[in-house]
Image (cartoon, rainbow, N blue to C red):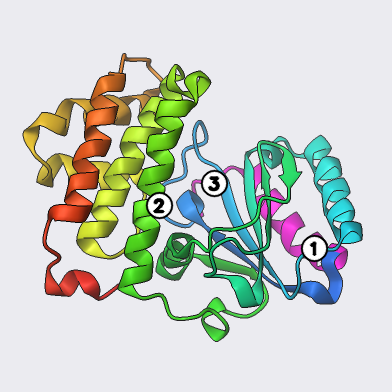
Amino acid sequence: MAHVPAKVSSLLQDISAQLPVVLGRNLVGIYLYGSVTLAAFNPKRSDVDCIVVTRRDLSEAQFRKVHAWLVQTAKSNPWTARLQMLFLVKNELLIMNSSGCLYQFGVLTRSGSDGNPIIWRDFLNSGRVLFGPRPESFLPEITWEMFFRALERELGYLRTEISAKQDWRDVPMYRAYAVLTVCRILYSFRNGTIVSKPRAAEWAIKYLPEEWREIILQAMEFNYTSRESEISMKGIEQFIDFADTELHFVPAEPDRRRLR
């Protein structure tokens, strides 16, 4: 994690040391994944992604303690606002509509969980254990079918956000995020593994039809430089439609079914 700011490293050390105290015996493990461990961390854009696995859903008392600890930590470390932390129950990790909490945008909520295997594929690819055992000791098998359904859901979530959330539609950062997320969904579908959004975009420029090159380059430029360019909303919607067609009408190759 050579390119991660010192304050991020300090935040991770605090999480590793303090959450075991706050959660006590209910805590199973803390797992870091995403751009930090994929060597793709961008201080202007990236979140700090963690999964906290517990034996049981947080009690009201534990929820309040975690909330209080996060509020206090945010006062001394501004990177707490960029922390995206999922609290998942050990026996419900891959179950739809299961228990769960989420800390995001500085707010802790009882969000529930969609049992997303993508985050676990991300961790297994490059993640780091901050506390507890390796998740292979308790994580159920992730089949190709489970992984594919999760990619479908991710694309569906993106389509809903693009169509329903007007405030997000008009934010250049979100438009770039949407394009890069579609690239990563398609990369994962074609290759059965997880990479960073920038790497997926580079792959998409090389392997997807030429018509998507401009919108992907625009998204990459914003991601790296923050220079605003008018990424067409219609173009994003058409790119999502293209990805949907790829997921549902392109025959799966035999090796695509073996997750790597």
Tell me the tag on residue 58. 1
Quadrant for the C terminus, please.
Answer: bottom left
Left/right placement of residue 62 relative to residue 39 reads right
Q: Position of residue 97 (x, y in %)?
A: 59, 60
Task: Reply above or below: 109 against 125.
Answer: above
Q: Position of residue 173 (x, y in %)?
A: 44, 25
Residue 62 seen in render: yes
Membership of 3 in magenta stretch: yes
**Looking at this view, is 166 or 198 the one in front?**
166
Label 1 or label 2, whichever comes before in sequence order: 1
Q: Which residue is mark 2?
A: 153
Labels 3 and 2: the sequence-earlier one: 3
The part of the image, by quadrant, that contains residue 134 is bottom right
Q: Amino acid at mark 2?
A: Arg
Which residue type carries mark 3? Val
Q: Which residue lies at the image location 23% right of the left edge and 34% below the top edge?
A: 239
Direction from residue 157 to residue 77 in the image, left or right = right
